[in-house]
Amino acid sequence: MSKIEVKNLTKRFSDKLVLDNISLKIEEGEIFGLLGPNGAGKSTLINLIIGLIKADNGDVIVGGHSISKEPIKVREQIGVVPQEIALFESLNARDNLEYWGGLYGLKGEKLKERIDEAIKIAGLEDNLKKKVKTYSGGMKRRLNVVAAMMHHPEILIMDEPTVGVDPQSRNHIFQVVKEMNKNHNATIIYTSHYMEEVEHLCSNIFILDLGKEVAFGTKEQLKRMVQDDKVFRIKATGDLNSLMFSLKKNSKIRGIEKESDGLKIITSADLNLNEVLNEIQTSNLQIKNLGIDEPSLEEVFLTLTGKKLRDGEE
Ligand SMILES: Nc1ncnc2c1ncn2[C@@H]1O[C@H](COP(=O)(O)OP(=O)(O)OP(=O)(O)O)[C@@H](O)[C@H]1O
Ligand SMILES: [Mg+2]
């Protein structure tokens, strides 16, 4: 059984169709990427999963419980990092965490323990006593992230947790996501419109645009949707012609082009890299660089929707 199953979710705001019959499955212990431009429906999908709003059609099953029939059982399993920072600006980190911990039903020694743990994970030990309004955007985000994890949820849902964040805090948040996943086997939904983040963190990726599923799969599967071939580039000096000659005998090599300082080799997707490497090794060339051209998820999105991921609303 999947940890989270979204079944045919449809949502309208007034007449506007915001989610159109979305279905997806997320397995336990997975970091699941939800990728889409502004207005795609990412936050709406999250709000439906946690039952903050009601669907016009469809249901969500979390750990075997239906959000429409057993919302409390669903919410117990989940921690949510909302897109908008949800902190009291005039309180310090400790007081904010006390509030959040209380909402999750933590009290006494356990609450104290979890506050200390959260502060440590967020790396905010030195700023404990300062009011949140004096924090940088990155510090606020880090606090917002750990606040959602105080009850050690089995599922962590993060809605664009790195928007407006400095690179250091961004890496810190990545680290927290990875550790939660690895050490606690947490299932994570990671929402972003930065494809490199999703590419870096997530095993399966669901691409959403204007409320519709654009594509779903591992990053390799998504890339293969737009590129059947593999493209290698060798930068080398020496007898390139003889290498071209020997490579051409391989039926999986579809084309070889000479470039100013090397070769571009186009092969079918099932070619084993070793087949090319062996030929190169016996060729007596001085290799300076060997690279594989891969489409990015940005290109995948562009090819499938005809527009750029960061273009925003329609
Ligand atoms: N409460 C609401 N009432 C009316 N329309 C809404 C409401 N919430 C969202 N929408 C609309 O639904 C669409 C999807 O919004 P949503 O916030 O889910 O997108 P998103 O993918 O999270 O975008 P972003 O990257 O900007 O956060 C948008 O067109 C938005 O204007
Ligand atoms: Mg959003």
Image: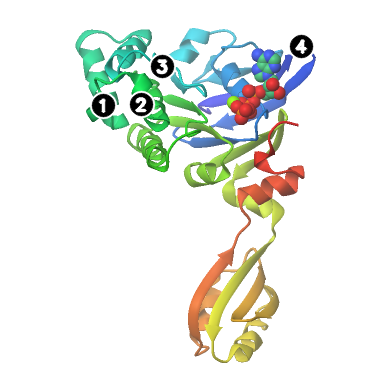
Residue 231 x/y as whole percent: 63, 67
Real-space CA distance between mark 2 and mark 3, rounded to the nearest whole angstrom: 11 Å
Q: Does the residue labelled 4 lie within 8 Å of ligand 1?
A: yes
| Vertical placement of residue 74 versus 120, above or below | above
Work out whether mark 2 precedes mark 3 in sequence or the reverse, and give the earlier one: 3
Foreground tag (4 vs 2): 2
- Report the amino acid beneath label 3: Leu
- Report the amino acid beneath label 2: Tyr
SS state under label 1: helix
Real-space CA distance between mark 3 and mark 1, rounded to the nearest whole angstrom: 15 Å
Work out whether mark 3 precedes mark 1 in sequence or the reverse, and give the earlier one: 3
Q: Are marks 1 and 2 in contact (CB under 8 Å)?
A: yes
For image coordinates 44% across by 26% down, the residue present is 156
SS state under label 2: loop
SS state under label 4: loop
On the image, numbered disc 4 is attached to which residue? 14
Q: Residue 135 carries which label?
A: 2
Left or right of 147? Residue 237 is: right
Work out whether mark 4 precedes mark 2 in sequence or the reverse, and give the earlier one: 4
Foreground tag (2 vs 3): 2
On the image, numbered disc 1 is attached to which residue? 127
| Vertical placement of residue 206 versus 232, above or below | above
On the image, numbered disc 3 is attached to which residue? 87
For image coordinates 73% across by 14% down, the residue present is 13
Real-space CA distance between mark 4 and mark 1, rounded to the nearest whole angstrom: 45 Å
Residue 222 x/y as whole percent: 64, 48
For image coordinates 48% across by 36% down, the residue present is 31
Neighbor class of circle 1 (other Cα within 10 Å; few <14, some 14-19, many 20+) is some
Whether residue 279 is visible to the viewer of this picture, yes or no, is: no
